[in-house]
Image (cartoon, coloured by chain):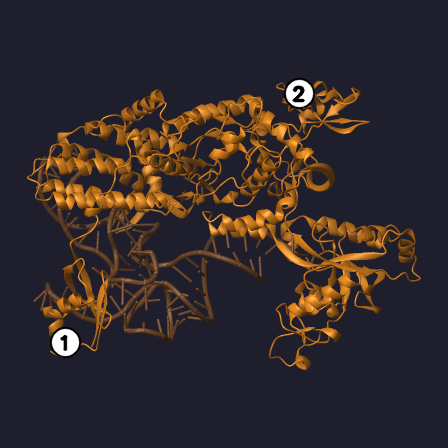
Chain colours: A orange, B brown
Amino acid sequence: MTSTAPSAVERYNAKDAEPRWQAAWAEQRLFETDNADGRPKYYVLEMFPYPSGRIHMGHVRNYAMGDVVARYKRARGFNVLHPMGWDAFGLPAENAAMERKVNPRDWTYANIASMRDQLKAMGLSLDWSREIATCDPDYYKHQQRMFLDFLDKGLVTRRTAKVNWDPVDHTVLANEQVIDGRGWRSGALVEQRELTQWFFKITDFAEDLLTALDGLDRWPEKVRLMQKNWIGRSEGLEVLFALVPDARAAAAQLAADGILRDIKVYTTRPDTLFGARFLAVAADHPLAAAVAATNPDLQAFIEECRRTGTAQAAIDTAEKLGFDTGLTVRHPLDPAWELPVYVANFVLMEYGTGAVFGCPAHDQRDLDFSNKYGLGNVPVVCPEGQDPEAFLITTTAYVEDGRMIHSRFLDGMTTDEAFEAVARRLEAEGVAKRKVQFRLRDWGVSRQRYWGCPIPIIHCESCGPVPVPVADLPVRLPDEVSFDQPGNPLERDQAWRNVPCPQCGAPARRETDTMDTFVDSSWYYARFTAPWLTDAPTDRATVDRWLAVDQYIGGIEHAILHLLYARFFMRAMRETGWAGVSEPFAGLFTQGMVVHETYKDAAGAWVPPAEIRFSTEEGERRAFHVKTQAPVAIGPIEKMSKSKKNVVDPDDIIASYGADTARWFVLSDSPPERDVIWSEEGVQGAARFVQKVWRLVNAAQAATGDGAADLALRKAAHRALAAVQDDIERLRFNRCVAHIYTLANALEDGLRGPVSRAAATEAAGILVQLIAPMMPHLAEECWTALGRPGLAAQAPWPEAEAGLLVEDEITLPVQINGKKRADVTVPRDADAKAVEAATLALETVQKILEGKPPRKVIVVPGRIVNLVV
RNA sequence: GCGGACGUGGCGGAACCGGUAGACGCACGAGACUUAAAAUCUUGCGGCCGCAAGGCCGUGCGGGUUCGAGUCCCGCCGUCCGCACCA
């Protein structure tokens, strides 16, 4: 018998051990990756953080997952690249500058320094020699270079676009930063402004970005679907509706001026053309402007539309409103048929052609509009099996397919046939062409901000926008900067702004817009492959060897923006020769959040978890304030947030329990794609397990049994090994944890029985290697205690012995009429006949059968026996 | 409105292809050790009936397919997420 009494060994001291092993890894440069290493590569990457100043539990979970994969793949013999960097440009630095009178650069680098320390305390196996910060000129210099290359290839354009403009802060706001029509910081009513903006032509790749999604088979289906919907491909027809030049001044003038002879309409339902009742254009359509020039009422209507245009809530409740221009157009399939032209608030200038034909019977919006303005409707698609004469539309449009009715030469056709017939006829007449339309729009990258990557352009009176010569890059941000006044300080920095034109030498001025920070994060993964390069963003051979990232891990909130931009950027880099691949991330995993209970005191104030004490009374868990002892209400479990004070600081957890405990806890219990509930009890459970592993490893060394129980223990160890391996590959960390617990329990049981020292230490060794990717410090301490050479972090992954994974005998459940009544134990390779015989020989079975033979016997080898009586 | 995911003990969850529902952990109960507490260990833990052996019920609800359904099919209910006037 072996004692596992606590007195036999000191408690494991994480506070002492963790820094010691971190130093040992760093000293041996274990995680620094050699590009020349010839072994198969594996690139694992977690989405790099914004340097806010402190890491949070979400980071801990994200980086713990990536580290498990990195350490495991390293043990499996891969040349692993696992780098870390900082998404360091962005608004918070400017806000800090305004509020605290600090320099954004100093603030950012101080934050990076403290967060780096925090990440290092987690014991992550990162290659810190490749660390990058996007605000470093050595990084953004190359981004500017690529911007110019993209410009050269026609992948960048400059044009006017509508933006959200905050008149108080003097800046463009992203849609997310507009709350109820007001700027989130200033509270000022946001205006729609036409500004000249730089765009990346992501729409050039719309088709490819869509079709290539099918090849991303290691991406979550959900993310692929979200991107698919975002790109939003549809097939339809662009149809010209000729304006009728009647006696009315406006139309006559328009036709005479040649401004508009016809209105181009995009439709995915040309089959319903005979159901048309009107035509509608957007408030921003050139036709609307032309008519409004002589019509103050329409002008007023257009302005009304612009006001309600932005606010999200307004759209939900917005009534369909229109303004009759008095103009008419000819129906493309019948020149004698005229349709009225409206300006309507539900037509978007940004999609299609900014004009639609209204078919009220088969489109709900058109029907609402038609019903409001008394334009009537004619059903032209009849559901199969319905009487066409009796098929009427009143308040609900019929949008499904069916048989054509009231449609002249289309009558009797299916929806698809009618689509084709109309398309062919109108194409032949030259008034329509087939068009594939995307919802995706070009990516506006201009930001009127200081703390971002300067756009390397100089504006010259005579030469226009001139690229900064590559030799002059980077265009550095000025260090001395003042935020005393609202707006972009770059615009006020005359010394920085006024430069000679690179082409003609005349006085010119720099572009003062900086790039959207999503540009920075669109290629950092490529930069990690050779971050030391000074004269190029990438090295072709190197970047092509490392990419795509084999496993990318991050939050679902980036499902569209970041992940779509990066896919675009990779293609643009391919076009400009900076990489040879199209897809940046072969495998993607989106992890869940860390959530926590919320607490409120009697006054309704949020109480942080650190000030809570629990007790159980009459089986019910209750919370009290530590100091006042006053009862505190336990509220719903929510995402950790400062406003609800349900935040647990990783630093505190690492200080009191150690990094391994924190890592183990965030990986256990919940499946990684789901939210994990942080709880004090849960952390303590994890901390208990840390001590248990330490005790077991030490106890295993002292085992003295004769080996009678060795086989059972060895089987348990090798089975756990095989199972954990499989589950790490599939990123099912919660199941890994469960298998490891099972092995620990088996080892504990084994040590109470007759296990030999050899078997006990073998099992303990496997246990240590299984925990190593998750709790690397504890693993090193145990590795040393077991007397193994070198570091656990360098040890190759053990091989599971196939012979130990299968049993000689198996026990099958015996069902009678589908209900379990007995067990039967047979040799592993027993055939169906032998299993049947063994089953029928069972006493319980015979009793139930009462001598009669069963009506049917189902034997599923290795699974189950079912008798039907 | 459209699209998607999910619903299993007190809780987080497990159950590969339809084959013993509830692995593993947390919480809780009983016990051992201790002056005591902590730590540790043993043990119980879906519900109902029963001293027990055992039986019956049970994976949101209602049907169905099957020797057998948490898993497949049909119809509901609920929760969460994404998009949202996209012609």
- Reading the image, the residue beneath label 1 is A849
Q: Is residue A682 left or right of residue A186?
A: left
In the image shown, does A170 or A667 lie closer to the viewer? Answer: A667
Quarter of the image for residue A159 reads: top right
Q: Amino acid at mark 1?
A: Leu
- Reading the image, the residue beneath label 2 is A472
Residue A120 image point, x, y percent? 39, 27
Residue A162 image point, x, y percent? 71, 42
Q: Is residue A448 left or right of residue A300?
A: left
Label 2 resides on the chain identified as A
Tell me the quadrant of the picture where the N terminus of chain A can be found: top left
Q: Is residue A64 above or below residue A419?
A: above
Residue A152 image point, x, y percent? 69, 33
- One can see residue A75 in this view: yes
Label 1 resides on the chain identified as A
Residue A669 image point, x, y percent? 32, 46
